[in-house]
Each structure stands twice: as C-alpha cells, then as structure tokens.
Amino acid sequence: MIQVGSIFLSILLLVLFAYRGVSVLVLSPLIALFTVFLNQGEPILANYTQIFMVKVGEFITSYFPLFLLSAIFGKLMEISGSARSVSNYISNKIGKENAILATVLSCGILTYGGISLFVVAFAVYPIAVELFKKSSTPKRLIPGAIGLGSFTFTMVSLPGTPSIQNAIPSQYFGTDTFAAPGIGMICSILMFSLGMWWLKYQFQKAKKTNEGYGDYHDNTEDISDEDLPQFWMSSAPIIMVILINYICIAFVFPNIDATYLAQLKYGETHLKTVASNWAIIVALFVSICALFLIYLKKQNITKSINAGAVDSLVPIFNTASVVGYGAVISNLPGFALIRDYILHISSGNPLISGAFVTGILGGVTGSASGGMSRALAKVISI
C-alpha cells in the first residue's frame, strides 16, 4: 500500500506545483526521484540516468523534427498573415451571426493543416472577439469554441492529421496517420457534434437572459484585411501538408526499397515504423518552402524562422520530461499493481483497458503525448 500511495502522492505534488507555475522541467525529475526515494530499495541515481534521461532522449530523438518543423510552419503562417486570412475567409462565408461555428471551423482547418494549436489560438482569438461581439455571443464561450476546434477531433481523430498525438501510435503499431479512417471519422463527428451542441445550448441559455457579449476589456488589435495574403495563397500550404502526407504514405514510401533500415546503424528498424514520421516531415518541409513564396516580401524572415525554432524547444522538452517521469513511475512496483487493477476492470478487453490506462497516465504525466507514450508501451503487450 505504501508503494501505491507514493505514486498517488507524486501525482498530487505534480499537480499542485504545476498549477503554482513551477516548470515541469524541474518538477518531473524531482518528483519522480522523490517517489523512488519513498520506495525503499530502488536506486535513485540509476532511475535518473538509466530510466528518466534515457526515455527523455528517446522521445526527443523520435519527435524533435516534428516539433521543430511544426513550430516554424506555424510561426510563418502567423506572421505572414496566412492564418488570419484563412480565419477571416471562413468567418465571412459562414456569417458573423454564426460566431461559434466560424471559430470552431477556423481552428479546425488550421490545426488539421499542421499548425500548432498554440499558434491557432493566438491567430483566431482576435477574430473570435469581433465575431462574438457582433453576434452578442458571450465571451466566456470563446475558450470552448477554440478548444473544440483545436484540440479535439482535429488533434486525435481526423484521418491524416499531422499532430504529434496521431503520430505517436504509429511507432508502436506500424501504421500511418491515415489508419482506421472509418472509426476516426465517426469519432470526429461525435466530438464535433456534441461539442457544438453544448456550446449552442449555452448560447441559447445566454440569449434567454440577455447576457450578451459581456462587459470585458479586450486587449486585441483591430482586425484589418490590408496586407493579408489572398485566401487561396494562405490555404495552399495547409492543403499541401495534408496532400503530401497522404501521397508519401499511399504512393511514395510503399514503392521504395528501405531494406537498409534493418542495418544496425539505422536502428535495425523497418519502413512501417518510420514511414509516418517521414511523411509528416516531408509534408511540413515542402509546405514551409511554399510559405517562403508568400512570405518573401516580408522582413525579418530569418528572425521568424529562429523564433519558430526556439518555440519548439519548450514543448518538446516539457513533453519529454513528463515522458521520463512516466517511465520512472511505470517501473515502480506500485504502478504494476495500479495497472493490473485497471486492466482487469474491462475483463480483458484491450480497447477499454487501453482507454483507461491512457487516460490515467495522461493525468499522471500531465501531458497527452507523454501519457500516450507510456500507456502504449504497456498496452501494446496486452
């Protein structure tokens, strides 16, 4: 019981200090090693250097190119005005009276095109403010609309989405980002429909009480269409990410000779394991090159690329750190007891077991991608 209790204590401490603003780069190793200390007989330094740091390195090695290219792509889309151009076009076509739907679709299209959800939130927020004001939609619903469009169906369910959460499972199952398109579409429709129903329900309640937009001070700049690239130019890089990703997976990589991957210097792997990552890397790289043409007349293009590169460091190191934390916790005896209990809840059904384990580990690590990485390593053996 002490071993199990130490794990729950570590989760509590992680949440407590994280909400107080302490960086997970510091929290993850400290709390992981504190939990090891509570489990007498477990070597502290060995857990740090041979488990924590090894898993941190493995995650960075596997996914750094995706974080880097995605951050640069998003930064160029943001500064070139392309992200705002796409959002403006969608809102104008749908109508300002449909502020919630316009915001959700704007975020969905941008994130499905490979733009970081953090970039999307900043790009769409000023547009959402204008739309919500003109349609008297409560401002408190803006976070929900941005969240629904950014990190629900487009992050985990839509076939081919280049998000890191969709790329991680391919490393374990040997699939690609377009795997199980039927189930993915069904889940996407459910997420979108239920999310929109809830937001519209809240909107209707607000209308009955004449709540309106609310008395808020918005620290946003006036939206101007001047100097923005045309919609077709802005949407081209997004479409390219999706199409090139699919072309690489469906036509290019299946027809190349990749037997050399079995060699020791290439990690003794095979094409199915790396094809998904390769496809996203190629798609983002080509789309970034296309953005250069849109952004060519802008100043400080080097500064923008550097800013995007720097922006990629904090997310990947934060995620890698919680992956390392999860690796240490999952190797403690108490975790095995918790895992076995969860796995038996579903009477041997690996899908339900996987859902439970992934959800709990996502909470334990404080990261969706970190929780997935640790859960898949355990569930894959079921």
Image (cartoon, grey):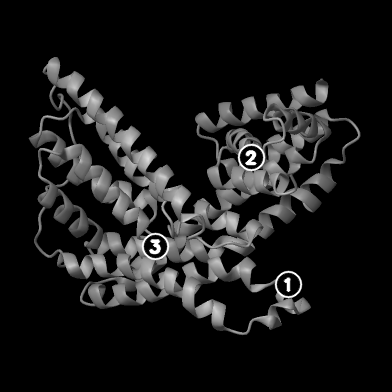
Q: Is residue 8 visible in the rendered structure shown here?
A: yes
Identify residue for label 2: 354
Q: Amino acid at mark 3?
A: Ala
- Density class for disc 1 (Cα within 10 Å; few <14, some 14-19, many ≥20) is few
Residue in the image at 61% along x and 31% along y: 14
Residue 348 found in image quarter: top right
Could you say where residue 128 lies in the image, as x and y percent from the top left?
20, 42
Whether 270 is drawn above or below 192: the answer is below
Residue that numbered label 3 is attached to: 307
SS for dot 2: helix
Specify few, some or many for label 3: CA neighbours under 10 Å numbering under 14, 14-19, or 20 or more. some
Residue 151 visible in the shown view: no
Q: Earlier in the sequence, mark 2 or mark 3?
A: 3
Give neighbour class at mark 2: few <14, some 14-19, many 20+ (Cα, 10 Å).
many
Q: Say which of 44 and 183 sits in front.
A: 183
**Which one is earlier in the sequence, the residue at label 1 or at label 2?**
1
Give whichever of 144, 300 is nearer the camera: 144
